């Protein structure tokens, strides 16, 4: 397509969980919206297969450079729908204390908003997006109303693990999942095919691809796949962003003029884009007078712990992850010797990902674990990693992408608190599996998930990049609404919280734009 | 679904489908290959250069370029022949005919594939890919045809006719044949390619070493043969062809493990070691406990990781493995699992 001659109201970079939602809210409010994503627009009925190898195409595969004592490269999605194409749709809310770890536990930083600030937005996202679950089971959950849908029943695999949890005095919980347990708003109920991570071939697993995106398009939004934004354009005289420049699928350069730019490209590509957009006014990165863009790169320390049982569990049946959750060790307990905590999430994927989580095994050891795949039960331990400004996303000095732009360089080391926390989680995962009857238990290597933190939210422009509504302190018509903005990460999956923050930001944008404050 | 035979290096495939549209518009869609990426997401690009069409496609973890010559007979057929790509021979055609139902057009897609003698994995995966994708491709083409009709860019089928058999009437016969060995046909046109086949995997001795490394990484045992005789070399060859750096990594490693066999066990090469010695050697590679400079710039543990990935990927994505371990494979088209919350049974072959 050629360059757009008109100026649109909003250009959104990244059409995943947050970008898709933002497009829908602003289009429905009457804004002219263009959303761009580097990946394709898939048709689930044509492009998705129950095949682990085939569906690796849904993962972001652009080059990244890693360094640090514990190099990490957490998964990101790509394409219209982004990570919601491959995710396991685990959607718990943060707990009350997750927003004030500095005050409560003396670690991390407090958010500039509270759980109570987000409640109406959590409610609305759960309703619009479709989340199933059970209120009242979790002694530690923050106060909430009923779920839009009843929980998915425990698979036989989950039931087996739940027995082990109970034996240790724990609380097996039905996990909140963005998966339809019943027909919902024209969508089908889950048929427990077990291929969540390969892209849901029905409409049971929520994705912005068939919810917010078509809703946005129904109100005139234009969603452009295979368009890679490489710079946000800026006019120094007015101190405003003016649009974006991007490569189309053939590598040709185009521009879009926009009155607002919203960046929702996830916590690696969002800071990368802001750094690539450095100019004479902002030589350290667009809107980066704080110097914080790319800093405090966080992720959850994770580990898959697998047990082999004497009876077949066929863990590939049912949702891949999270129909069973355990948060008995989520809140801080000083006696453990570390702050914060983690969630255990029931997890057995297809055979390839199952084995891929055991890279510390090989030879006969590994063969035995794969041989008894049908007898395997597993936990995914998801812990809270603390912010550390030595962990960074920067522009690599040497490696370039196919367009000649420096790729992201991810530098990361776990802190001592992170190490102790994840080891405690691994231990508890093992104990529950053994209590449930496992005769062999193996923990995979410590890994990571859910990048966050790289465009920090706060009230003080010296210690944050954006305000609580996602608005850049430095540039009034530039917004960031994805997990980059998280000051701390909580001890469980983050997408629902990111979407609630995005919804809140979208309403602020609507009010401010209509009052003329964003011109 | 047919089961694959690995003693042969050839497959033939055919599918017939009926579309509620005129021959003209069906031919228009099938012949306009440069437009395929607009509605087939696994095709990244199709560019015409003279008589050649250059494709770039996604297949599993790989991005694969290929070039085909195309012969079109207006309103009747589109025939294609691979002149450069991942298999030795691939020919095929779309045939377009009047259907028995008025206002409907029958299309017949036929594909013939040949691989080298070591191409078992490639043939298996090509066949699996074709089977998985053909229904979806037919659906994509059908939707495209319907869309063009709806937007008025082609002859419109009267509504009462279009309702016959549903908007897209499925009439398909599907068969897959594995024939006996025939001489491979040479490509009709030589084209220089940016992705030549790696020569490393034509060296018989190195192939033996590679297979021995794979079996050491995941041993044969009383359960099954692991990746032995599953086409491991052909898979590694494919990845080495389309992923930068992999051929050099394997070339370095195959030489290095032979030298390690000499220094550690005074034997000629890796294949001459006992199983226990091979395990000890591979463990040293895993832990970077290697003396001297025989690995050059390559970190031995990085090769261990690459080998681990390739062996595990092949083993765990192979339908023969699934049969043994009791993983049924795709489940969506069978309606998922109604018994997911009940006590389970093992459905594998070996307990």
Image (cartoon, coloured by chain):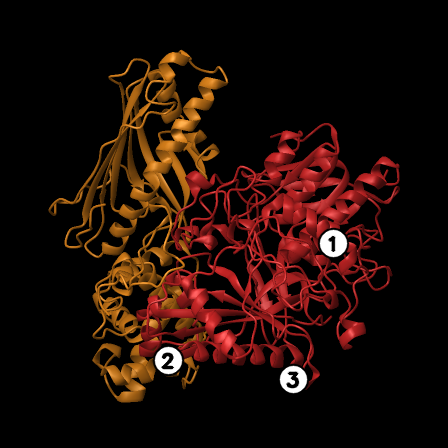
Q: Please state the horizontal and vertical placement of residue B325, each as a whole percent of the image.
A: 29, 65
Corner quadrant of residue B349:
bottom left
Q: Chain of mark 1?
A: A
Residue A336 bears which disc, if any? 3
Pick whichever, A335 or B180, lies toward us: A335
* Residue B49 x/y as whole percent: 41, 32
Residue at which label 2 appears = A439
Residue A15 in sight:
no
Describe the element under mark 2 as helix, strand or loop. loop
Q: Is residue B328 visible?
A: yes
Q: CA distance from mark 1 to mark 3?
A: 31 Å
Identify the secondary structure beneath mark 3. Answer: helix
Q: Earlier in the sequence, mark 1 or mark 2?
A: 1
Q: Are marks 1 and 3 on the same chain?
A: yes
Residue found 26% across the figure and 78% down from its top: B270
Nearer the observer, A185 or B51: A185
* CA–CA distance in space, label 2 to label 3: 27 Å
Circles 1 and 2 on the same subunit: yes
Give the mark toward the camera: 1 or 3: 1
Q: Which quarter of the rendered picture does the N terminus of chain A lie within?
A: top right
Q: Could you tell me residue A425's position as x and y percent?
A: 56, 77
Tell me: B138 left or right of A198: left
Which residue is at a point 35% across and 39% down the rendered structure image? B67
Residue A119 - label: 1
């Amino acid at each position: 397509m050629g360059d757009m001659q008109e100026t649109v109201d909003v250009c959104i970079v990244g059409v995943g969980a947050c970008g898709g939602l933002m497009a829908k809210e602003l289009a429905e409010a009457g804004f002219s919206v263009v959303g761009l994503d580097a990946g394709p627009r898939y048709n689930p009925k044509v492009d998705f297969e129950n095949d682990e190898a085939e569906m690796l195409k849904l993962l972001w595969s652009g080059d990244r450079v890693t360094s640090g004592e514990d190099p990490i490269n957490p998964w990101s999605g790509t394409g219209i729908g982004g990570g919601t194409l491959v995710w396991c749709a685990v959607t718990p809310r943060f707990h009350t204390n997750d927003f004030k770890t500095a005050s409560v536990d003396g670690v991390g930083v407090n958010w500039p908003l509270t759980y109570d600030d987000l409640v109406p937005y959590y409610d609305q996202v759960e309703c619009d997006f479709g989340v199933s679950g059970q209120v009242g089971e979790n002694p530690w959950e923050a106060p909430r109303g009923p779920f839009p849908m009843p929980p998915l029943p425990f698979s036989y695999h989950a039931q087996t693990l739940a027995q082990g949890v109970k034996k240790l005095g724990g609380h097996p919980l039905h996990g909140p999942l963005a998966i339809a347990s019943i027909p919902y708003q024209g969508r089908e109920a889950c048929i427990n095919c077990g291929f969540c991570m390969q892209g849901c071939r029905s409409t049971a697993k929520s994705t912005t691809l068939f919810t917010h995106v078509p809703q946005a398009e129904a109100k005139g939004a234009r969603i452009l796949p295979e368009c890679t934004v490489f710079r946000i354009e800026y006019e120094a005289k007015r101190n405003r962003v003016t649009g974006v420049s991007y490569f189309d699928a053939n590598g040709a350069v185009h521009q879009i003029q926009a009155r607002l730019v919203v960046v929702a490209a996830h916590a690696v590509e969002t800071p990368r884009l802001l750094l690539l957009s450095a100019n004479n006014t902002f030589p350290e990165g667009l809107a980066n007078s704080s110097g914080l863009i790319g800093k405090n790169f966080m992720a959850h320390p994770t580990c898959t712990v697998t047990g082999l049982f004497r009876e077949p569990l066929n863990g590939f049946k049912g949702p891949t992850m999270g129909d069973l959750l355990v948060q008995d060790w989520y809140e801080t307990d000083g006696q453990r010797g570390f702050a914060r905590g983690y969630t255990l999430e029931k997890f057995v994927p297809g055979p390839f990902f199952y084995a891929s989580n055991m890279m510390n095994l090989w030879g006969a050891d590994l063969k035995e674990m794969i041989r008894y795949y049908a007898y395997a039960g597993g936990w995914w331990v998801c812990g809270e990693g603390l912010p550390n400004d030595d962990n960074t996303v920067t522009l690599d000095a040497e490696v370039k992408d196919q367009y000649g732009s420096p790729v992201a360089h991810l530098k990361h080391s776990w802190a001592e608190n992170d190490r102790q926390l994840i080891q405690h989680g691994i231990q508890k995962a093992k104990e529950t599996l053994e209590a449930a009857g496992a005769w062999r238990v193996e923990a995979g290597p410590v890994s990571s998930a859910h990048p966050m933190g790289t465009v920090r939210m706060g009230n003080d422009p010296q210690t944050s990049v954006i305000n609580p509504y996602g608005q850049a302190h430095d540039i009034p018509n530039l917004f960031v609404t994805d997990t980059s903005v998280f000051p701390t990460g909580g001890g469980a999956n983050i997408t629902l919280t990111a979407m609630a923050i995005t919804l809140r930001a979208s309403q602020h944008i609507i009010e401010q734009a209509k009052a003329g404050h964003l011109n | 679904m047919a089961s694959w035979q690995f003693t042969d290096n050839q497959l033939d495939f055919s599918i017939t489908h009926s579309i509620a549209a005129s021959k003209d518009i069906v031919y228009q869609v099938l012949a306009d290959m440069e437009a395929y990426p607009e509605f087939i997401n696994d095709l990244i690009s199709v560019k015409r250069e003279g008589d050649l069409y250059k494709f770039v496609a996604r297949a599993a973890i790989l991005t694969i370029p290929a070039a085909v010559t195309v012969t079109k007979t207006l309103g009747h057929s589109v025939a294609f022949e691979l002149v450069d790509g991942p298999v030795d021979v691939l020919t095929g055609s779309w045939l377009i005919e009047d259907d028995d139902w008025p206002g409907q057009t029958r299309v017949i897609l036929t594909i013939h594939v040949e691989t080298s003698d070591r191409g078992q994995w490639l043939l298996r995966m090509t066949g699996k890919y074709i089977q998985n994708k053909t229904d979806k491709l037919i659906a994509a083409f059908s939707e495209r045809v319907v869309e063009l009709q709806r937007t008025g860019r082609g002859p419109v089928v009267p509504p009462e006719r279009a309702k016959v058999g549903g908007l897209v009437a499925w009439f398909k016969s599907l068969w897959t044949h594995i024939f006996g060995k025939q001489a491979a046909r040479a490509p009709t046109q030589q084209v220089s390619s940016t992705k030549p086949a790696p020569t490393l995997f034509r060296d018989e001795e190195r192939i033996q070493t590679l297979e021995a490394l794979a079996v050491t990484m995941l041993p044969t045992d009383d359960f099954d043969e692991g990746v032995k005789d599953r086409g491991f070399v052909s898979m590694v060859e494919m990845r080495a062809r389309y992923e930068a750096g992999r051929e050099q990594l394997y070339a370095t490693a195959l030489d290095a493990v032979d030298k390690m066999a000499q220094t550690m066990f005074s034997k000629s090469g890796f294949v001459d070691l006992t199983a226990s010695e091979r395990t000890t050697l591979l463990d040293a590679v895993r832990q970077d406990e290697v003396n001297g400079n025989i690995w050059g710039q390559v970190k031995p543990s990085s090769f261990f990781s690459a080998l681990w990935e390739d062996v595990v990927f092949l083993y765990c994505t192979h339908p023969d493995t699934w049969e043994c371990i009791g993983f049924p494979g795709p489940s969506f088209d069978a309606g998922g699992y109604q018994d997911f919350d009940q006590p389970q049974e093992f459905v594998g072959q070996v307990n």
